[in-house]
Image: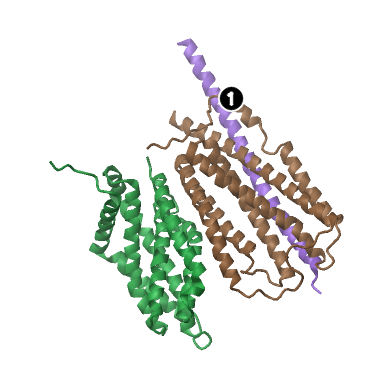
Amino acid sequence: MIDTKSYMVGAYTVATAIYLTYVTSLWNRARRTSRNLAVALEAKDRAGAERDASRSQG
Amino acid sequence: MTVPHRGTVPPHREPHALVAKPIFDWFFAVGVLAMVALYVRSLAFTPPDAMQGMAQKIYYIHIPAWLASYTAVGITALTSVVYLWLHDERADRLSEASAEIGLVFLTGGLSTGMFWGRVIWGAWWVWWDMRLTLTLFLWFVVAAYLVLRGAIEDEAMRARYSAVLAVLAALLIPFIHLSVYLFSAGMHPMPVVLQPGEPKLSPQMLVTFLFGFVAFELFCIALIRARYRYAVQRDILATLETSGDAR
Amino acid sequence: MSELRAPGTLRAAWLVARKDLTIEFRTRTAFFSALVFAVLALCIFYFAWDESIVPPVALAPGVLWVVLTFSALLGLQRSFGLEEHDRGIDALLVSPVSRESIYLGKAIGNLLFLSAVQVVTIPALAVFYNVPMGRQWAVVTGVVVLAMIGIVAVGTLFSAMAVNTRLAELLLPMLSLPFFVPVLMSAAQISARVLAGRPLAEAAGYMRILIGFDLVFIIACTLAFPFTLEE
């Protein structure tokens, strides 16, 4: 008789591994992007503030 | 005939709101919870099939995965047509997100399918099972779509080319279906080890099965949503970076 | 007074095809390379099997299609590559030739190029693999022509796309091969049956797929081609 239980365990494990791996990869990418985005926005705001300050002086 | 690429990401108008939107929010939590509940119900609270034993439980995560993948890939095909018609960047972003999620579920469906086949047909792979073979070719097509996207830097060209590929692929699927059908009809199926096909479901098993569809669809939509938001942030970042360089 | 009229679609297509083929056969290097590749591949496949276990005659239909596919990919790689040098595509776009004609012309050029390679390769296959010549070869030739039409229709479009990307050589097979599957499956099954002496009627379903694919994809790719051109 085929050991059906181990195949079931194998299938569930592989499937879960696939979904977990993907979610982890997406989370990592998202984290990196939002961090870079926050930095870029801050830099842009700072640059904008500097431009406004120099314009009001001129 | 100019093909405009209508951007929807204006960097000068409150992008902070979009940055504040988390990628993984309550909707995603619901999707994950549904999957966990499915696992628990399938493994602990549903009786195994009399003839197929524990392996029948593979079905609860195999068939819904296949359905989720077809949903995602279908979304890609539809939004590709929408993009070619309206040239809206959002449609292209949704195509991209759905295609990636589609590939994930295709992979899941194929691997669980192989375990399932090993039990009931005695082989890890058979060419005469239509669903298995069709899913395999679909996997290759979606992979090609993603590789194509990765190989083009210009957003407008990338959107246009991948939309064309998606529409042509949608035309291709019926032909693959037909040829695999003819091919498998001519083959001699291998001797069946256990009773094949759709198992007869007791009411308990039916509930788990239907719940499986719901859980997978929720998870699929949640993933597409998350991936879409990631794409929005990535595109805002890219726009900021290029406009910064231009200064 | 005679006025200069833009050529009609088919005539323009033929002009484009003739231009490509003239360039091709002026140097003939691409043609000879594709030819040598195809014939060498035939030989290599022969040595990949033990002829005492598997008679070469049984292998022949399969080898025919595998070698045809890869010769086609080689030929398709160069079709838009021809325009890369000196941005020849701009000249084509500026001329009073419709976009559809450019596509059809390229496709016809590719078809003729591939046919020229097969004219040598298929008899070579028959000789190397001891396949008896008979009336069924007329049918096989017909199937080869139908298959080449389908392969070239899709391959020409993807070649136009791939040439604009970073991974052109890798991308063309990756994009095209899934599309070749119905064509190759049907054509191989028909030719295997026909060469084994079975009546063509047995493979009627496959014939319908082959013809249907050609019709659908010639139209679809002609319509899709303008989207692949930079505006």
Secondary element at image label 1: loop
Name the residue type under label 1.
Glu
**Quadrant occupied by the C terminus of chain C:** top left
Q: Colour of chain A?
A: purple
Q: Residue at x 74, y 36 (%)?
A: B26
Which x, y percent locates residue B135?
61, 59
- Looking at the image, what colour scheme do you see? by chain
Q: Residue furthest top?
A: A57
Query: Circle 1: is it few (<14), some (14-19), or many (20+) Cα within 10 Å?
Result: few
Q: Residue furthest front?
A: C201
Q: Quick check: can you spot residue C24?
A: yes
Instruction: In the picture, one chain is brown; tell me its letter.
Output: B
Taking depth in this image into account, of B206 and C26 the one nearest to the observer is B206
Task: Report the label total.
Answer: 1
Subunit under mark 1: B
Q: Is residue B146 left or right of residue B206?
A: left
Q: Is residue C47 left or right of residue B235?
A: left
Which x, y percent locates residue B234?
57, 38
Q: Is residue B12 left or right of residue C141?
A: right
Taking depth in this image into account, of A50 and B67 the one nearest to the observer is B67
**Quadrant occupied by the N terminus of chain C:** top left
Q: Quick check: can you spot residue C185?
A: no
Q: Quadrant of residue B114?
A: bottom right
Residue B16 sits above or below residue B91 on the image: above
The residue where tag 1 is placed is B14
Q: Quadrant of residue B53?
A: bottom right
Instruction: In the picture, one chain is green; tell me its letter.
Output: C
Which x, y percent locates residue B180?
57, 65
Which x, y percent locates residue A12?
75, 58
Q: Residue furthest bottom?
A: C52
Residue B196 sits above or below residue C57 on the image: above
